[in-house]
Image (cartoon, rainbow, N blue to C red):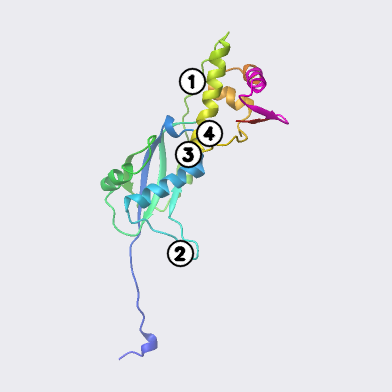
Amino acid sequence: MPDAEQQYLVEVFVLINIRAKFTRGEEVKYISHLDMMKMFERALRRSGLPVYYSQGFNPHPQIVFGLPLSVGVTSEAEYVDIVFSEDVEPRQFVEDLNRQLPDGLKILEANVKTSKSNIMATITKASYEVLVTIAQNPDINEVNEKIIQFLENIKTYNNHKAQEMVSFTRQQIADFTGLRVETVIRTLSRLSQHGKVKIIDHKLYY
């Protein structure tokens, strides 16, 4: 009989690592990378999938995303690695998680990852498509509406109800709306005069 102090209880389990490909559509293109990570975490909790959590005083799910997208950009091929504490069939994972993800996020495919390669190091290139339309003499009302709609989208996706400072520069607003930066500057000044926005120390509030 071995000594009692020499007896150990050993728990052995195998972690399952799944790499998934997903799309990020128009509905969530103004969501930050951090907020998107939280969306995935909430969706995984609701799905009931056996996600593996780190050990320690502040456990968190083992999820690693590829290179983060800039705000305002959509994607047809994003990648994420998720670790599970139990065996998970990739097809069932896709179905369960898609039922919980919001519109604009959709898992396209998933496979069990067998290598130990880091997902960020694995992605070596990306292809971008930029569509820009610039009106030579845009109608003032159309320009006002386009900029207000852009600001409304930011407020909606950030879940802001009170007036908040807009983190986008005039150039970024021009890029996203397809307007000239000079047009954006003049329009924001005009909207400020009509009380639609506020400009304090060159900072934009909406």
Q: Position of residue 55 (x, y in %)?
A: 45, 64
Q: Nearer the viewer, residue 121 or 150?
A: 150
Question: What separation in Å lies between label 1 and label 3 (alpha carbons)?
Answer: 24 Å
Magenta span has 34?
A: no
- Alpha-carbon neighbours of circle 3 within 10 Å: few (<14), some, or many (≥20)? few
198 horizontally vs 85: left or right: right
199 horizontally vs 115: left or right: right
Q: Position of residue 123 (x, y in %)?
A: 46, 41
Instruction: Find residue 186 and report its image quarter.
Output: top right
Q: Quadrant of the C terminus?
A: top right
| Camera-nearest label, 2 or 3 | 2
- Residue that numbered label 1 is attached to: 131
Q: Nearer the viewer, residue 80 or 1?
A: 80
Question: What separation in Å lies between label 2 and label 4 (alpha carbons)?
Answer: 36 Å
Instruction: Tell which circle, 2 or 4, labels the residue nearer the N-terminal end.
Output: 2
Question: What separation in Å lies between label 2 and label 1 (alpha carbons)?
Answer: 45 Å
Q: Secondary structure at mark 2?
A: loop
Magenta span has 201?
A: yes
Residue at the (60%, 34%) spot, across then down: 163
Name the mark on residue 55: 2
Q: Amino acid at mark 3?
A: Thr
Q: Nearer the viewer, residue 206 or 125?
A: 206
**Residue 57 vertical placement versus 76 (above, below):** below
- Residue that numbered label 4 is attached to: 155
**Residue 125 vertical placement versus 37 (above, below):** above
- Residue that numbered label 3 is attached to: 124
Q: Which residues are magenta?
A: 186-202
Q: Amino acid at mark 2?
A: Gln
Question: What separation in Å lies between label 1 and label 4 (alpha carbons)?
Answer: 24 Å
